[in-house]
Amino acid sequence: MPPLRAATLLLLALASPLGAQTPGTSVLRWGGDAEGGAPFVEADPANPSGVRGFDVEIAGMIAEGLHRKPQFIQVAWESIEASIERGDFDLGMSGLEDRPALRARHAVTIPYYEFHEVLAVRPADTARFKTVADLAGRRVGTLGGTTAYSILLDAQTKSGVIPVSYDDDVHPYTDLAAGRLDAVLLDNIIAERSLRRSGGFVIQPVPVATGHYVGIFAHDNTALRDSANAILLARMRDGSLERSFRKWNVWSPEQAQFEHDLLNTATTAAPAASVSSALPTGGLASVPHYLPALFRAALITLVLSCLSMALAVALGICIAAGRVYGPSVVRALLTAYVEVMRGTPVLLQLFVIYYGLSGVIRLPAFAAALLGLGLNYAAYESEIYRAALESIAPAQLEAARTLGLSEGQILRLIRGPQALRLALAPMTNDFVSLLKDSSLVSVITVVELTKQTAIYATNIGSWVIPGILCAVLYLVFSLPLSHAARRLEQRWSVS
């Protein structure tokens, strides 16, 4: 097997840490974000490569009803909608809220769970802040892009509430307990989970609003959506949904009434045992269960960083040579490329390559990540090489030309080796930076080291141990590289 093909197959296997495989007709691919945690979707403590939660079980019910096998694909919560239309998976489920904008863009299932937007405040403020209107001029945290965030934006216009958007549903409550927020507005499931986990606040009993969780399919995939609707109704009738919700301690009289109204018939089912695990879910005891997933994610990070750096170096050399030796038109075009790539965020470039160009070419997530990081860092590398080439004394170049050497020989024998010595240290710094910037590729469904660490931290409710493990793994990668670069500098140094 050719080495390039073998490497490609290896990378495709590595880039699928949570079950993303080549889809088949017997598979229902569904996407969610395990960083959101239980009871929606979380990494299974018994097997962090797998997932569990009531959304996991409902996706399994839909797959079973379709005579397919469920296949989970990890994707950042805020990217689920874009990924479903891109065709990365068939069904999106991860606590997605039913709202008009969602129905306008996608084929949305019937609601399967009713939740309430609830206000969380510190115990001392229970009497003062009972409603959102009471929080005029106060900081209220929530998740961006949610119904709660829309409510707060409306309250900002009406009463001067200050919305504070977060990328996760853990830090709003820790900031509330620490006094950096005056209140948090989020789903009752999230609020109750955080209250059990960390405490430090109370939940006001009167809901601010009512909403529903739904699944989504691509806008044109209405036939599959209709089949899923029929399956959801059947699972409500036979009590399967109730058993799942009871198992995850989210069944309520309101949910019972909601299903009754939806089906226009009573639903009865024997209660199931609550979810429990004999396996440790936090502290040092959790480390052995999560280390394999962290090592696999670390390997993805390392392979992605090395290949991206190789691409950046190759392109950077070509760009630098073009800017030093090329005609004015070539120099202008290459300069424009360098300024655009350095002047725009790499996160934006990843979104453009993965989502923006999906109508023209649908790159695999790993390939898009490799291309995005490589193209971005090529601009930085080219500036290092250009500066190194132009730093060589003109007298040396003139002497070489006087001896009859061609420009190619001068570059290969005189200018290039000296420039490489000058460029080595900044190249090392760039590689370490790229290693860390690889954490951004999780937004396009690549589960690298930082994303897997975030899932681990959410699962156990603490960043201390996962953060330390993540930092150690990054240092294991970067410190030997820095040491090797210093050895080379010493070896190549001249008096």
Image (cartoon, grey):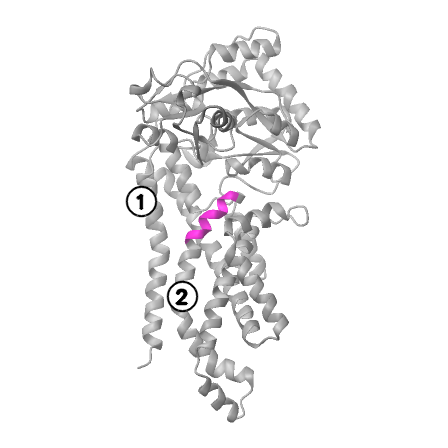
Image quarter (top left, top right, bottom left or bottom right) of the C terminus: bottom left
**Secondary-structure class at tag 2:** helix
Location of residue 33 with respect to 271 vertically, above or below: below
Picture quarter containing residue 97? Answer: top right
**Is residue 64 rendered magenta in the image?**
no
Picture quarter containing residue 289? Answer: top left
Q: Nearer the viewer, residue 35 or 273?
A: 35
Residue 248 visible in the shown view: no
- Disc 1 designates what residue? 468
Q: Are marks 2 and 1 in contact (CB under 8 Å)?
A: no
Measuring 63% from the left and 41% from the top, which residue is drawn there?
A: 86
Residue 346: percent from left, percent from top? 50, 52
Left of 89 or right of it: where is 282?
A: left
Image quarter (top left, top right, bottom left or bottom right) of the N terminus: bottom right
Location of residue 278 with respect to 326 vertically, above or below: above
Measuring 61% from the left and 49% from the top, which residue is drawn there?
A: 363
Residue 370: percent from left, percent from top? 53, 54
Picture quarter containing residue 39? Answer: top left
Between discs 2 and 1, the one toward the N terminus:
2
Mark 1: which amino acid?
A: Ile
Q: Nearer the viewer, mark 2 or mark 1?
A: 2
Location of residue 132 with respect to 52 vertically, above or below: above
Extent of the magenta region: 436-443
- Disc 2 designates what residue? 426
Residue 119 visible in the shown view: yes
